[in-house]
Amino acid sequence: MKKLIFFSLFTLFTFPALAQIRYEKGYFIDSTGHRTECLIKNVDWKNNPKEIEYKLSEQAESSTATVANITEFGIDNTSKYIAENVSIDRSGNSRTKLINDRNLNFVEEKLFLKVLIEGTASLYHYEDKELERFFYRTKSSPLQQLVYKRYLVEDNRIAVNAGFKQQLWTDLRHPEVDLHQLETLGYNKQHLSRYFLSYNNSKGQTSVSYDTKSKADLFNLKIVPGTEYTFLSMSNPYSTFRNGEYENINYRIGLEAEVIMPFNNGKWALFIEPTFQHFSGKNQLKQREASIAYKSIEVPLAVRHYFFLNQQSRIFLNAGYIWDFPIASTIDYRIGNDLEISSGSNFMGGAGISYRKLSLEFRYQTGRNIVNDYNSWNANINKYSLLLAYKIL
């Protein structure tokens, strides 16, 4: 047991140290217009960066460039950012930050804007935590924000100033889009990118799209068999003769559905893994024999963080919460009343390594009382699991 605990702690704290920082081919343009080819640390920023780390070669020391001293940077075949002085409205979007004013409050800032569509009409994106803003520019109109603001009206209801639709109708009227269709347009990357691409195409102009993240690998389905070492401790201060400990190695089988978050180069994921597990054991107590037949469906919901070693290999850490639903499970005492096992929940943590479609994981579950329905009884169960997952989709 001590070896298993030591291994889990060793795995959790040493795996991140093995991960490699990824610098990818790119460039930046300084304030004089000079272009420098370099290697840029690709964080796949969810929030628009204020600075970047770069190297002039693999062996060189890393340096930092900020929005104040470069005008543009890009990572080959991945992304492009421009540094611009813009008027931006930073009105809050969550209900607790909404105010009774539909008008935008613009402030002047120099920001890195992510280029989504580049062409006759260009679309840019800015994100900072809960704040999301879009900007556009055409050959005849300067860079400006597409207007969108949520605000409060009477009876504390939420209204929306969707002025961006009027902007598009005035500056980027699409011959194939009428007012009714424009009304259904959402203030998001998918809808706006599609509109700008379609508009440029209607003008006979070619667009460059930088919002080309593949969605094919954002969902994974895996079959997850494994073995579990289970330790159960029964205790009741008023029936000490029924106290005892049980342990066994059992098998389990699960189906994991994993969703990769579309930022930070796919380093973060959420997954749910319905799992059938069983545990059985016998114990000769002081005055009687007891046996356990415990079957259940466990449903872990967890977050996963990947550390990339290369294009095919990754190490990862998991943390999550488990709901357990027993199936006709009991603790059977040959003499006396039996105990029915009840549903419960607990936490889990794990670490593992994946290679192509296969992954190997060590997982630990914190204690869970499986007889919650009985006063004075405590049946604390702990698990250590070794899991082998295979990606089927």
Image (tube, rainbow, N blue to C red):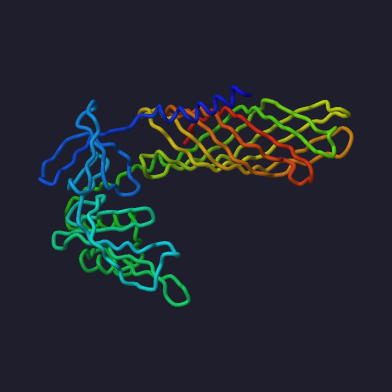
**Where residue 285 sits in the image (x, y, percent)?**
84, 28
**Where residue 291 sits in the image (x, y, percent)?**
80, 31
Is 308 left or right of 302, judged from the image as shown?
left
**Where residue 290 sits in the image (x, y, percent)?**
82, 31
Q: Within the image, what quadrant is residue 252 found in? A: top right
Is 36 left or right of 302, judged from the image as shown?
left
Figure quadrant of the N terminus: top right
Q: Within the image, what quadrant is residue 246 found in? A: top right
Q: Residue furthest bottom?
A: 154
**Where residue 289 sits in the image (x, y, percent)?**
85, 28
The residue that appears at 20% across and 49% down in the rendered structure is: 68
Is 381 left or right of 152, judged from the image as shown?
right
Total number of numbered discs in the rendering: 0
Position above or below: 6 against 169: above
The residue that appears at 14% across and 59% down in the rendered structure is: 139
> In this view of the protein, which residue sits in the foreground, 246 or 293?
246
Q: Residue furthest top?
A: 3
Is 12 left or right of 17, judged from the image as shown?
right
> In this view of the protein, which residue sits in the foreground, 219 or 379?
379
Q: Residue furthest front?
A: 237
> In this view of the protein, which residue sits in the foreground, 332 or 176?
332
The residue that appears at 35% across and 66% down in the rendered structure is: 149
The residue that appears at 24% across and 57% down in the rendered structure is: 109
